[in-house]
Image: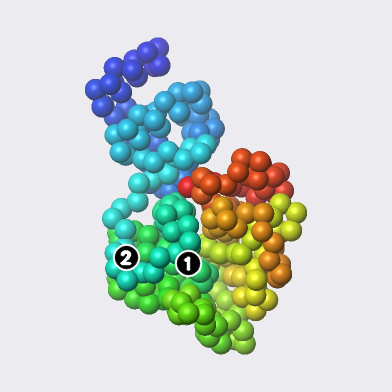
Amino acid sequence: MPSTQALPDLARGRTLPRHERIIERLAAKGVVEVAALAEELGVSTVTIRADLDALEKRQLIRRIRGGAMALRPARFERPVDLPSQSFSNEKERIADQAAALVRDGETVILDAGTTTLAIAHALPSALTDVVVVTNGLDIALALQAHEGVTVIVTGGRLKRGGRNARSSSLISPFGTTLLREINADLAFLCCAGVDASRGFTNGNWEEAEVKKAMMASARRVVFVADHGKIGHVGSARIAPLDQADLLITDQGAAAADIQALEAAGVQVTIA
């Protein structure tokens, strides 16, 4: 039986054909789910979980809730003067998982924000053909040395980020003009709040309008928010939860909150 034969192979660190298939799927998609792998490979979810655990022990993948994600290549170097931020460790984990979704040949929208800035720094250095459209000046500057990324800035009026100029964003007027002319593969958006009944919200009306335009221009929409944003409601509504394809948050999020968000229509992944 396959299950009994797998045990000595795992103990010796041998890569099984099934493991190779899993790694191939991760290389293609970035993230895989246990149930989908079990159906595709014709084995039980128990077997897949054991496979993923074994591959993680060999440092070939990273386990996440309900599945696994690819170990990204060497990340784009982070400047040493990047300021400290609230939930900085959580944001880095979220960024790592988000960056693993980006593939060569894609056009990606990066909303202005500290977590999306972390995504910019987490983009693998192995990428050779990615277009990033952003309204974040800090993001544009962070990616200027990445040879595999072409950066396009949206334009608009500069909204300064208070004392921290690195969080400056471009908003209306003209902040949405370019966005209406592009078809992006993927958009990563930040928000001030995520609530099961009120959806994704922000504290600034003009920024919220730019975020709406970003969502309308992208084939897939991923919100990134640390657990401190969950349950909070900002004054400006961005979108209902079911208009996003994915929400990536961190392990500090309460299980009850995650269940409520998923029941409201958004898939949630824990980094």
In the rendered image, which quarter is residue 14 located in? Answer: top left
Determine the secondary structure under disc 2: loop
Name the residue rendered at 42%, 54% in the picture: 89
Q: Which residue is the site of mark 1?
A: 114
Residue 141 in the image: x percent, y percent?
38, 77
Name the residue rendered at 30%, 23% in the picture: 10
Residue 92 in the image: x percent, y percent?
42, 56
In the image, what residue type sits under mark 2?
Arg
- Can you say whether 201 is above or below 271 in the image? below
Determine the secondary structure under disc 1: helix
Residue 200 seen in the figure: no
Label 1 crowd (10 A; few <14 / some 14-19 / many >=20) = many
Is 132 on the left or on the right of 245, as rendered?
left
Residue 268 seen in the figure: yes
Q: Which residue is the site of mark 2?
A: 78
In the rendered image, which quarter is residue 17 located in? Answer: top left
Q: How is the image coloured?
A: rainbow
Name the residue rendered at 51%, 49% in the picture: 250
In the image, what residue type sits under mark 1?
Thr
- Give the mark, 2 or 1, whose residue is nearer the N terminus: 2
Name the residue rendered at 38%, 45% in the picture: 70
Nearer to the camera, 22 or 264: 264
Residue 258 in the image: x percent, y percent?
63, 44
